């Protein structure tokens, strides 16, 4: 830091002194600039550049940029401006290669080399970041941070190859399970469709045969049944509330046993029911008529009582 505070004023002093001297005594510089402009515009009809204005603008730029560089204010920009003022003066005024006098050629060569040294120092000062990261480095770092933040925000993110492998394995397992479920659904669906197709005709025929009979029975006795249920509904509800817990406890205690018994003898009972189905149906029909008569008697008694 101390080195920069010493080096910058030393580098800027030449330009500040030269700029102030040019502003105070511009005649010699204007004359030289006029010769250069006239030499450059000898092939054109008019000269669009005023030599006096050009000299004064260059001198003012040297004083202003030199002062900023010496004070350490925007040193990189100030060094760049000074370097821009050095290049044209070095090329035009120190053209030792066009000088025929040996002494003037040597003098201009020395001045040319000094200007080159100043230009090199200004280029270094223009690139000096004072130990801080350059704008390019900051931009690349910001880009890397932004990329990392975006990757971390994504579902897979930058978690690495392990997480990606786990996700792929999970996706594969899900696909296998889905395929198994689809196969099972297709198999069971076919069985259900065959059963529905087989039993559907039987159920439809049975409903077609006995449906009108049931409808007439419900139509004829529905009112009586409704009155009976209305009369004895509170009694049944009380019994259900009184014995419901007991029945539930018995069912919990013997449910497994009953289920095993049903699984063991289910086929046998089904065969017996199939063999004795007509007898059971006739008995049920006879008992049903008796029960229906008893219900009618109770309904009439309840109605006239």
Image (cartoon, helix red, strand yellow):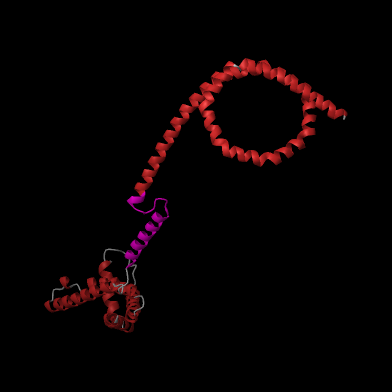
Residue 285 visible to an observer of this rendering: yes
The secondary structure making up most of the magenta span is helix
Query: Which residue reaches farthest left?
Result: 102
Query: Which range of residues does the magenta coloring cover?
Result: 134-163
Q: Residue 140 sits in which quadrant?
A: bottom left
Residue 86 visible to an observer of this rendering: no
298 vs 58, left or right, is: right
Residue 278 position, x and y percent, is 63, 15
Q: Residue 68 sits in which quadrant?
A: bottom left
Which residue is at a point 43% across and 30% down the rendered structure image?
A: 183
Determine whether 194 is above or below 52 in the image: above
- Nearer-the-camera pick, 71 or 302: 302
- Nearer-the-camera pick, 233 or 165: 233
Residue 246 position, x and y percent, is 65, 40
Determine whether 251 is above or below 12 in the image: above
- Nearer-the-camera pick, 61 or 169: 169
Q: Is residue 161 magenta?
A: yes
Which residue is at a point 78% across and 33% down the rendered structure image?
A: 232
Dividing the image into 4 quarters, which one contains the N terminus? bottom left
Q: Is residue 245 magenta?
A: no
């Amino acid at each position: 830091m101390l080195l920069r505070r010493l080096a910058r004023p030393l580098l800027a002093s030449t330009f500040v002194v030269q700029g102030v001297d040019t502003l105070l005594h511009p005649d010699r510089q204007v004359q030289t600039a006029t010769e250069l402009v006239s030499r450059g515009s000898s092939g054109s009809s008019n000269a669009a550049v005023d030599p006096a204005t050009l000299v004064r603008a260059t001198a003012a730029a040297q004083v202003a940029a030199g002062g900023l560089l010496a004070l350490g204010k925007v040193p990189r920009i100030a060094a760049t401006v000074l370097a821009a003022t050095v290049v044209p003066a070095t090329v035009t005024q120190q053209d030792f290669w066009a000088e025929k006098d040996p002494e003037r050629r040597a003098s201009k060569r020395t001045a040319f080399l000094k200007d080159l040294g100043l230009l090199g120092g200004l280029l270094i000062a223009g690139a000096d970041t004072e130990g801080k990261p350059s704008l390019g480095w900051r931009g690349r770092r910001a880009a890397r941070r932004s990329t990392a933040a975006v990757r971390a925000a994504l579902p897979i993110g930058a978690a690495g190859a392990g997480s990606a492998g786990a996700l792929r394995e999970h996706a594969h397992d899900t696909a296998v399970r889905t395929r198994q479920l689809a196969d099972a659904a297709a198999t069971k669906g076919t069985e259900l469709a065959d059963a529905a197709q087989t039993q559907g005709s039987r159920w439809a025929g049975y409903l077609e045969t006995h449906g009108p009979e049931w409808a007439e029975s419900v139509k004829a006795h529905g009112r009586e049944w409704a009155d009976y249920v209305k009369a004895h509904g509170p009694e049944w509800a009380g019994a259900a509330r009184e014995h419901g817990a007991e029945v539930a406890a018995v069912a919990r205690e013997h449910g497994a046993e009953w289920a095993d018994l049903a699984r063991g003898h289910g086929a046998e009972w089904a065969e017996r029911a199939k063999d004795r189905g007509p007898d059971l149906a006739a008995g049920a029909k006879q008992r049903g008529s008796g029960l229906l008569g008893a219900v009618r008697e109770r309904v009439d008694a309840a109605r006239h009582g």
